[in-house]
Image (cartoon, grey):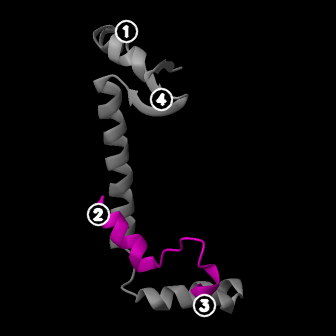
Amino acid sequence: MARHVSAREARNRFADIMGSVRDGGEEIIVERSGRPMAALIPVDTYERLVAERRSRFEVLDQIRSNLPDVAPEEVERDIANAIGDRHLLDLSSYQDIPILTVRQFLERLEKR
């Protein structure tokens, strides 16, 4: 479990904290006014997390490459028809809720 320290303590004891992360494998959450602001983790933990994330996106890319080439609008229409809610195509009723089209979702995936 991660240890929580204030930003002030992290600044004052930075070398000690870095040592406990590097040598002891400790995970540190740095807080400002009681709110988590940053995490200090060992490099091997970071590398594992990055590798896991990369492999998950590779799976998504593989799945996406096997999908038929269908226009995003057609996919949205099929989804709305499948659940029987044609009003979902009128996205104006969801002004306060961020909604991504299939195209926007795929574009965000490609940026990663």
Quadrant the C terminus occupies: bottom left
Residue 32: mark in rendering: 4
Residue 94 on the magenta segment = yes
State the residue in front, 92 or 86: 92
CA gap between label 4 and label 2 equals: 31 Å
Per the model, the C-alpha gap separating discs 4 and 3 is 42 Å
* Amino acid type, label 2: Lys
Query: What residue appears at the point 36 percent right and 10 percent down from the top-left corner?
Result: 20
> For this rendering, which residue is in front, 86 or 18?
18
In the rendering, at what x and y percent does residue 93 appear? Answer: 64, 84
Instruction: Give the position of the N terminus as an image quadrant.
Output: top right
Element at badge 2?
Answer: helix
First in sequence, mark 4 or 2: give its number: 4
Q: Would you name the residue on which mark 1 appears? A: 24
- On residue 90, the disc is 3
User: Which numbered marker is on residue 111?
Assistant: 2
Give neighbour class at mark 2: few <14, some 14-19, many 20+ (Cα, 10 Å): few
On screen, residue 83 versus residue 90, left or right, reads right
- Range of magenta residues: 91-112
Q: Horizontally, is 93 left or right of 47 in the view?
A: right
Q: Main secondary structure of the magenta part?
A: helix
